[in-house]
């Protein structure tokens, strides 16, 4: 990091129990992930003076920090959808670099699958009732429909095919098969993806992410604490963030996402180029998001994502650029 005087590293990472967890609360999953991340790093809880969390209401960092027995002097509760945790990690790294914190713990826990199974309400009734979304959400313009429309626009403008989108799901499943903690590990084919029930054209069921229970935690620390850790540090070289829109009607270009800006900033600040990367971890709620983000980050040109994801390029075993390796 160049924003401050101190180097920052990821020193601990951990998962809570994931997949199907019917007997835990979100708070318990937060605690489980936090304990495991601290154990992974070999640092005591008392060292943590920064905390970040979101997803459990407006007081998430306060309530979860209290539950974990933390009294942080730096907190963050950024909420920007799927990029929330990357953005909070960037904020944490910047805070540490500037001396506002020494060690920041980011924690997430969710019982989204169990909530649905038990019939508990999981939606926010105010979503779409005000602001720009009030002109879209009441008419069935769901999050899935939003990205399905973007995918269809990419297909029209650049010739991307449903088979290429399906390749993303096939290779993601192949990578998951190598992870004993993955929820689904059985291999799938392009035909399997295309034969599934249609959710929002062109997305069939296997084009969409699954809803699961689980949690995770990441611990970032200043360089002077690294020597006390049992893990090898992963130094933070650069970060970037960008918000472009919420409503579909305000999306400047359906075939380009915010990563086109945030990625450029991150690479510039880190002093590296996309072609120097050995692998990439990309938010993939839908197959199209992987494809278009690879373009936006500069791994291939705009409109070339369809061809880029073919021929096993994203695979951990044998792929030129392993993507979403777990």
Image: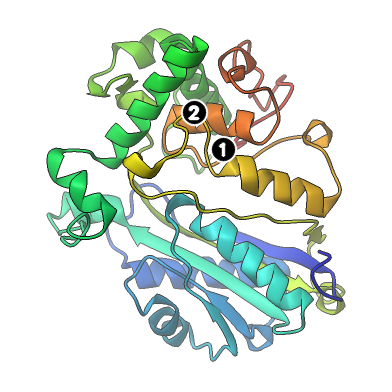
Secondary structure state at the residue bearing disc 1: loop
Measured as percent of width and height from the top left, residue 167 is found at 51, 16
Above or below, 222 against 311 in this view is below
Residue 95 shows up from this direction: yes
The alpha-carbon separation of the residues under discs 2 and 1 comes to 32 Å
Measured as percent of width and height from the top left, residue 276 is found at 84, 35
**To which residue does mark 1 refer?**
179
**To which residue does mark 2 refer?**
255
On the image, which quarter does residue 323 sit in?
top right
Circle 2 residues within 10 Å: few <14, some 14–19, many ≥20: many
Secondary structure state at the residue bearing disc 2: loop
Q: Earlier in the sequence, mark 2 or mark 1?
A: 1
Along the line of sight, which residue is nearer the eye, 58 or 72?
58
Above or below, 161 against 216 in this view is above
Residue 43 shows up from this direction: no
Q: Quadrant of the N terminus?
A: bottom right
Q: Quadrant of the C terminus?
A: top right
The answer to whether residue 159 is left or right of residue 278 is left
Above or below, 326 against 126 in this view is above
On the image, which quarter does residue 208 sit in?
top left
Along the line of sight, which residue is nearer the eye, 168 or 80?
80
Along the line of sight, which residue is nearer the eye, 74 or 127?
127
Please give the name of the residue rendered at 87% of the width and 74% of the height, measured from the top-left corner: 227
Circle 1 residues within 10 Å: few <14, some 14–19, many ≥20: some
Measured as percent of width and height from the top left, residue 133 is found at 25, 51
């Amino acid at each position: 990091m160049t924003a401050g005087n101190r180097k920052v590293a990821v020193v601990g990472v951990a998962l809570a129990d994931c997949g199907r967890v019917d007997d835990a609360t979100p708070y318990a999953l937060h605690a489980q992930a936090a304990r495991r991340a601290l154990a992974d790093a070999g640092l005591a809880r008392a060292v943590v003076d920064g905390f970040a969390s979101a997803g459990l209401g407006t007081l998430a960092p306060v309530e979860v920090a209290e539950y974990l027995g933390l009294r942080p002097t730096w907190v963050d509760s950024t909420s920007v959808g799927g990029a929330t945790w990357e953005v909070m990690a960037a904020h944490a790294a910047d805070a540490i670099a500037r001396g506002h914190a020494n060690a920041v713990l980011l924690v997430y826990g969710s019982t989204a699958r169990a909530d649905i199974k038990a019939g508990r309400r999981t939606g926010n009734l105010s979503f779409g009732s005000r602001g720009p979304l009030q002109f879209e959400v009441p008419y069935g313009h769901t999050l899935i429909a939003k990205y399905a429309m973007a995918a269809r626009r990419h297909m029209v403008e650049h010739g991307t095919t449903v088979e290429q989108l399906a390749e993303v799901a096939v290779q993601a499943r192949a990578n998951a098969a190598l992870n004993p903690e993955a929820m689904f590990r059985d291999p799938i084919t392009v035909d399997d993806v295309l034969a599934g029930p249609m959710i929002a054209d062109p997305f069939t069921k296997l084009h969409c992410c699954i809803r699961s229970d689980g949690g995770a935690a990441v611990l970032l620390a200043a360089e002077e604490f690294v020597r006390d850790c049992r893990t090898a540090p992963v130094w933070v070289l650069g970060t970037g963030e960008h918000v472009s829109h919420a409503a579909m009607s305000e999306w400047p270009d359906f075939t380009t996402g915010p990563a086109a800006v945030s990625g450029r900033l991150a690479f510039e600040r880190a002093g590296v180029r996309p072609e120097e990367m050995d692998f990439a971890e990309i938010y993939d709620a839908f197959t199209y998001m992987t494809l278009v983000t690879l373009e936006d980050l500069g791994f291939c040109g705009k409109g070339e994502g369809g061809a880029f994801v073919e021929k096993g390029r994203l695979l951990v075993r044998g792929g030129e650029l392993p993507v979403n390796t777990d």
